[in-house]
Amino acid sequence: MGKIYYVMGKSSSGKDTIYKKLMEAHPRFRTIVPYTTRPIREGERDGVEYFFVDGERLREMQEAGQVIEVRSYDTKCGIWTYFTADDGQIDLNAHDYLVIGTLVSYQALREYFGERKMVPVYIEVEDGLRLARAVERERRQAEPKYQELCRRFLADAEDFSEKNLKKAGITRRFENGNLEECLAEIEEFIRSSERV
């Protein structure tokens, strides 16, 4: 029986890098591509990072009972909706999956698939270092969106509050001060989870 290893953390915690490294190290893992109504960004490909859809397609999928979880954000660029769908991508009888997402999304998938199927991998970084990383990453963009960066940073404090982490059953945390050490800890955690 398969499991969903769910990587999450505040913005600029390094979760994207960790996710990519884990995918390279574990080619057996399948992915679950989420959906979004936000515009595609430079370098993104439809069906890889997200399926990019409009509001009408979201409504159709909701009416068909395919949407597992959905969340919308009022950003500086408009309302963006993200969701996960049971659209034929997921077969836990045959495969393990590696997913990256939010705490809210993790909780919805845990409720949908059951606690035993979900393995949380929560990445942490000290807030000052995380903010410095976020600003530097945004500075390198062709059109930096510092207001959106600030919104995300502040929203993360609430989204990943201690109360919410406790409610979600997140007890194990992986400190990403040193990428290689963090990855080694996660690898050991995955091996131990496979034996359960």
Image (cartoon, rainbow, N blue to C red):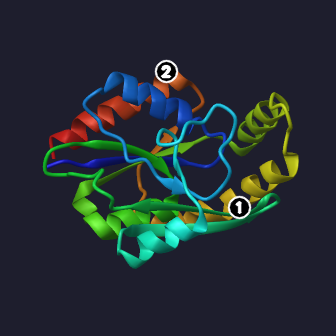
**Mark 1 near mark 2, Cβ–Cβ under 8 Å?**
no
Q: Is residue 158 left or right of residue 50?
A: right
Inspect this view and state whether residue 163 appears: no
- Give the labeled residue for mark 2: 180
Which residue corresponds to the image point at 66% horizontal and 65% vertical from the top-left?
A: 158
Tell which circle, 1 or 2, labels the residue nearer the N-terminal end: 1
Q: Nearer the viewer, residue 141 or 20?
A: 141
Q: Residues within 10 Å of mark 1 (few under 14, many from 20)?
A: some
Q: Is residue 75 left or right of residue 176?
A: right
The percent position of residue 89, horizontal first and vertical second, equals 30, 50
Q: Is residue 47 left or right of residue 65?
A: right
The percent position of residue 80, horizontal first and vertical second, equals 67, 62
Which quadrant of the figure has residue 56?
Answer: bottom right
Q: Nearer the viewer, residue 25 or 90?
A: 90
Which quadrant of the figure has residue 65?
Answer: bottom left
In the rendered view, tell whether residue 52 sits above or below residue 186: below
Q: Nearer the viewer, mark 1 or mark 2?
A: 1
Q: Secondary structure at mark 1?
A: helix
In the rendered view, tell whether residue 68 sits above or below residue 51: below
Q: Secondary structure at mark 2?
A: helix
Q: Nearer the viewer, residue 138 or 41?
A: 41
Q: Disc 1 marks which amino acid?
A: Ala
The percent position of residue 50, horizontal first and vertical second, equals 52, 47
Residue 155 is tagged as: 1
Residue 117 is tagged as: none
Q: Nearer the viewer, residue 114 or 64?
A: 64
Q: Disc 2 marks which amino acid?
A: Glu
Inspect this view and state whether residue 70 appears: yes
The percent position of residue 127, horizontal first and vertical second, equals 72, 45
Which residue corresponds to the image point at 19% horizontal and 48% vertical from the top-left?
A: 2
